[in-house]
Image: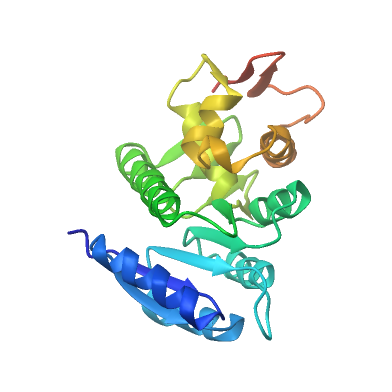
Amino acid sequence: MSGERLLVVEDEAHLAEVIAENLELEGYAVSVVGDGLAALEAVRRDRPELVLLDVMLPGLDGFSVCERLRAEKNDVPVLFLTAKSSNDDRVRGLELGGDDYLGKPFELRELILRVKAILKRAHWYSAATHDKDKLVLGSATVDFKTFTASVRGEEVLLSTKETMILRVLAEQPGEVVPRSVILDKVWGYDAFPTTRTVDNFIVRLRRVLEPDPQSPRYIHTVRGSGYRLTP
């Protein structure tokens, strides 16, 4: 039994109870709250390993909850649960810093599999960072533990996903890493309808780390394949 702490944020009491009971059967320690502000308080207080976050909440919606947590430099993994399952909503949630997105209605078995996959990715990042916690790219130094980059003496905060993408690329320096591998390790492949969001994160990383983002020296695009990091 894992005993990892999960927070379920769901205003439909019956659904929240069903989700919590099934996760507890898997060995997780589960707390439940019913609105966005209570979710923020619970995350700050209890530091769960994962938040299962409904989007349509009273008071403060799930997207806003995730956005506030990321602004506070809180990198707790977030699995969005929502009846709004259009691609635009999915991409928005993931670009705000969510880790996965599951549309309602869903099979409980799929929910549990996604929870396990997110926690597995979090453990991978923690273990990989323990082995090597910094990456040097010219005048820029990325700290994988603090999610920051020091660029010419200025500290820049990176998002969790930006840092995880760099972590994946840094594991295979000089080699082409397919977009599908990045998707699988950072989000889980099924989380995305397209690879567009990966490209958007790469653009942001270049703006921060490259001396000339239009002519990258470190993060190269290999057309039709993926990306290559050249430290």
In this view, 92 is above or below 192:
below
Q: How many marks?
A: 0
Task: In this rendered view, identify the residue nearer to me: 183 or 138.
Answer: 183
Q: Tell me which residue sits at (59%, 53%) in the image.
A: 101
In this view, 7 is above or below 206:
below
Task: In this rendered view, identify the residue nearer to me: 189 or 169.
Answer: 189
Residue 141: quarter of image: top right
Q: Tell me which residue sits at (39%, 52%) in the image.
A: 109
In the displayed image of the protein, which residue is found farthest to the right?
A: 214
Q: Tell me which residue sits at (74%, 55%) in the image.
A: 89
Residue 115: quarter of image: bottom left
Q: Quadrant of the N terminus?
A: bottom left
In this view, 132 is above or below 117:
above
- Tell whether 111 sits left or right of 3: right
In this view, 157 is above or below 230:
below
| Residue 231 spot, x, y in % from top left | 54, 23
Task: In this rendered view, identify the residue nearer to me: 181 or 133.
Answer: 181
- Tell whether 223 sits left or right of 159: right
Residue 129: quarter of image: top left
In the displayed image of the protein, which residue is found farthest to the left?
A: 1
| Residue 99 spot, x, y in % from top left | 54, 51
- Tell whether 47 sits left or right of 177: left
| Residue 140 spot, x, y in % from top left | 59, 38
Task: In this rendered view, identify the residue nearer to me: 224 or 101.
Answer: 101
Q: Tell me which residue sits at (64%, 51%) in the image.
A: 94
Can I make out residue 179 in this image? yes
| Residue 64 spot, x, y in % from top left | 68, 71
